[in-house]
Image (cartoon, helix red, strand yellow):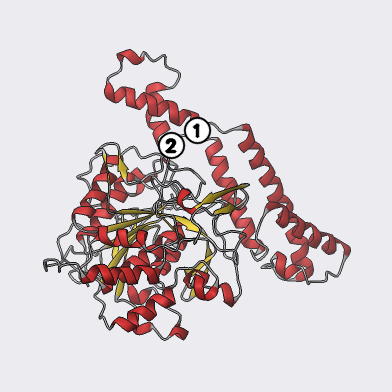
């Protein structure tokens, strides 16, 4: 599932507007600006002083798709030079026809795409339902595989229960949405603007008593629900509709028939991993909002006022669509990783995750395949406020199947700043130093959005991860001798840390405070300038790698 936090239990990530001073707060430097950013301008200034020429670097983004028509992203799309566009021939014989800019593992050969998918727990539940529901099970008679299935069935069945509290929340939000619709209609009639927000509404003077009462009610309801005052009325209603639709689906998931969307559209033999040449080349898909935002952060287009464009690395983004609205399929993720590796990516950004992974071994093996090929995987920690030392979220570095941990995988939690919220920690990010490695800005982050020249703000560990991916790309571009594991080590050892490492920071809305080393292993926030300095030092003492021929590295 795409890694986005829930605000007051329901808000899907929304566009919000900030002043120019906070537009790219995550690029700022703590010493200079007193903002807990990544010191990106300082990093570029260091690169300018080194007189080093950068090498081409490919970053793969496994996500929900990217708007390839965006004016900024269009110019940095990875291009498969061995593939002739739109000739319906697999020119490079890799099994994927016309994969010019990447591949879509959620598409059918007829051009259709999977948009929404069920939660993995729902898929597992219906897969095992006929085997275990209302059955008296003698566990002593079960074989090893059946015992494992029985244990999963018990866990998933419990997780599928829709609690009274969840039902009450759903009813409350439904009532709130219906009320907001009526209030909004009265305001639109008086104001003549259907795209109003609470902030726009506050200075407005309604003409009549009904509109005056509607204005007060709208502002009061938005405040109670914790909705940002810059969010427009249509966006609020859309977000509430999505929340209600998703919760209603979960409420009836046990009784509903399992979806056949994959069988209908993709038509692969899912449990046969050798059946891998499915999909299409539509890397945008039906909803590229999340992936477009992530891609813009991987690119991290420099502010032209810094005059550092010539130090921007020759970066290309390879788009792999494998994450629907809902839980991703293990097979698509595993094949997406292998596709990225085989086509020259040296960094893979993965801003998604889920609580169950029935074909975990496929993904674990793909991550280790990436390690063999010197590819760094950067993964978002998730937004459920889980302690990942106690709660499994997949994928993660440790493989119970292979009984080892992937050394080429970096897990990223989300940080903030007091200019954005009341703390440098967020109330949504997962944490836990056994699994989480590093913190990175992830609260109210500005980046590209679908549209020719559209931009906006989103929050989540989904945003924190690609910011780290960009710094990793800088390092691998300017210091290509360094391995994936060395780059991971550099990123962790060069974090910004408070002078007093025992200092605890408030977690907003949680009535708890934590030290940074209780959030992630590195005990600090990623810092581009520190990382560049350390990379230069380590690269100077690192022998050159053998110059092996790389496939499709343009």
- Determine whether, in the image, residue 268 is placed left or right of residue 328: left
Residue farthest along the right direction in this orientation: 209
Q: Is residue 333 above or below residue 16?
A: above
Task: Assess whether mark 2 and mark 1 are in contact (beta carbons under 8 angstroms).
Answer: yes
In which quadrant of the rendered view does residue 195 lie? bottom right
Could you say which disc has been placed on residue 160 in the image? 1
Q: Is residue 295 above or below residue 519?
A: below
Provide the secondary structure element on which disc 1 rests.
loop
| Pointer 1 local density, CA inside 10 Å: few below 14, some 14–19, many at least 20 | some
At a point 60% along the width and 51% down the height, the residue shown is: 241
Provide the secondary structure element on which disc 2 rests.
helix
Could you say which disc has been placed on residue 263 in the image? none
Q: Position of residue 123 (x, y in %)?
A: 40, 37
Q: Which of 447 and 127 lies nearest the eye of the viewer?
A: 447
At a point 24% along the width and 59% down the height, the residue shown is: 375
Q: Which of 308 and 345 lies nearest the eye of the viewer?
A: 308
Q: Position of residue 19 (x, y in %)?
A: 61, 75
* Residue 374 in view here: yes
Distance of mark 1 from mark 2, alpha carbons? 7 Å
Could you say which disc has been placed on residue 121 in the image? 2
């Amino acid at each position: 599932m795409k890694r986005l936090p829930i605000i007051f239990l329901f808000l899907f990530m929304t566009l919000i507007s900030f002043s120019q001073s906070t537009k790219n707060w995550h690029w700022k430097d703590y010493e200079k600006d007193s903002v807990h950013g990544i010191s990106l301008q300082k990093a570029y200034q260091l690169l300018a002083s080194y007189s080093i020429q950068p090498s081409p670097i490919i970053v793969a983004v496994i996500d929900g798709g990217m708007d390839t028509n965006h004016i900024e992203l269009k110019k940095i799309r990875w291009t498969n030079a061995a593939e002739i566009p739109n000739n319906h021939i697999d020119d490079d014989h890799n099994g994927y026809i016309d994969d010019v800019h990447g591949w879509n593992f959620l598409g059918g050969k007829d051009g259709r795409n999977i948009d929404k998918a069920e939660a993995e727990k729902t898929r597992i539940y219906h897969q095992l339902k006929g085997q275990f529901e209302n059955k008296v099970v003698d566990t002593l008679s079960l074989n090893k595989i059946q015992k494992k299935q029985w244990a999963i069935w018990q866990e998933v069945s419990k997780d599928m229960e829709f609690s009274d509290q969840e039902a009450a929340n759903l009813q409350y939000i439904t009532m709130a949405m219906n009320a907001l619709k009526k209030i909004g209609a009265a305001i639109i009639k008086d104001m003549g603007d259907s795209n109003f927000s609470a902030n726009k509404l506050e200075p407005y003077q309604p003409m009549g008593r009904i509109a005056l009462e509607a204005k007060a009610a709208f502002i009061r309801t938005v405040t109670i629900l914790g909705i940002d005052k810059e969010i427009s009325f249509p966006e609020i209603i859309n977000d509430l509709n999505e929340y209600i639709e998703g919760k209603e689906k979960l409420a009836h998931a046990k009784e509903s028939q399992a979806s056949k969307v994959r069988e209908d559209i993709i038509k692969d033999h899912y449990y046969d991993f050798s059946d891998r040449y499915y999909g299409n080349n539509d890397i945008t898909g039906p909803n590229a909002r999340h992936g477009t935002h992530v891609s813009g952060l991987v690119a991290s287009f420099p502010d032209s006022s810094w005059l550092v464009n010539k130090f921007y690395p020759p970066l290309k983004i390879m788009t792999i669509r494998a994450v629907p609205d809902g839980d991703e399929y293990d097979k698509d993720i595993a094949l997406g990783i292998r596709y990225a590796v085989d086509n020259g990516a040296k960094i893979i950004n993965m801003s998604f995750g889920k609580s169950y992974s029935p074909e975990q071994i496929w993904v674990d093996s793909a991550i280790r395949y990436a390690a063999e090929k010197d590819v760094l995987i950067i993964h978002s920690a998730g937004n459920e406020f889980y302690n990942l030392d106690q709660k499994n979220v997949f994928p993660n570095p440790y493989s119970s199947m292979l009984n080892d941990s992937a050394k080429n995988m970096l897990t990223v939690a989300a940080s903030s700043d007091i200019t954005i919220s009341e703390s440098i920690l967020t109330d949504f990010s997962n944490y836990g130093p056994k699994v989480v490695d590093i913190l990175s800005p992830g609260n109210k982050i500005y980046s590209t959005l679908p549209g020719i020249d559209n931009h906006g703000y989103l929050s989540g560990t989904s945003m924190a991860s690609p910011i780290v991916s960009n710094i990793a790309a800088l390092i691998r571009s300017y210091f290509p001798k360094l391995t994936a594991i060395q780059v991971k080590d550099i990123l962790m050892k060069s974090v910004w840390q408070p002078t007093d490492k025992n200092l605890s920071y408030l977690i907003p809305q949680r009535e708890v405070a934590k030290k940074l080393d209780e959030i992630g292993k590195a005990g600090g926030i990623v810092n581009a300038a520190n990382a560049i300095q350390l990379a230069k030092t380590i690269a100077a003492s690192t022998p050159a790698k053998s110059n092996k021929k790389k496939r499709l590295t343009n």
